[in-house]
Amino acid sequence: MKDLAKGYAIPVNSFQEIEPVTLDELKTIFPDFIPPQSYLILKKPDLLKFLLGRKRIGEKIYQT
């Protein structure tokens, strides 16, 4: 990001584990999906909706 005028970071205060999803499944539903290498720009509302719709497993984890 050294060539950018500004950069942003979003702290992760909690997370919820979801049921596993395979790369093949993601590519079937979202053919242009490329796994993020270090970050993901959240400009893909269909992908976000799909992931938020996954079955939650385990307990929600909060960072203290």
Image (cartoon, rainbow, N blue to C red):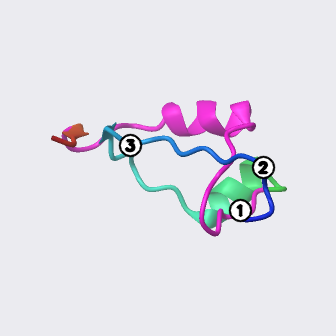
Tell me the tag on residue 12. 3
Residue range of the region highlighted in magenta in the rendering: 33-59
Measured from the top left, where is residue 20 in percent x and y? 43, 56
Residue 3 in the image: above or below residue 42: below
Q: Which residue is mark 2?
A: 5
How far is disc 3 from disc 1 in space, using C-alphas? 20 Å
The residue most toward the right is 32
How far is disc 1 from disc 2 in space, using C-alphas? 8 Å
Tell me the residue at 62%/65% (across/down): 23
Tell me the residue at 21%/38% (across/down): 62
Specify whether 58 is left or right of 17.
Answer: left
* Residue closer to the observer: 25 or 36: 36
Kindly identify the amino acid type of the residue bearing the numbered disc 3.
Answer: Val
Tell me the tag on residue 1. 1
Q: Residues within 10 Å of mark 2 (few under 14, many from 20)?
A: few
Q: Place residue 24 in its image quadrant.
A: bottom right
- For the residues carrying marks 3 and 1, which lies nearer the camera in this image? 1
Q: Place residue 31 in its image quadrant.
A: bottom right
**Secondary element type, mark 1:** loop
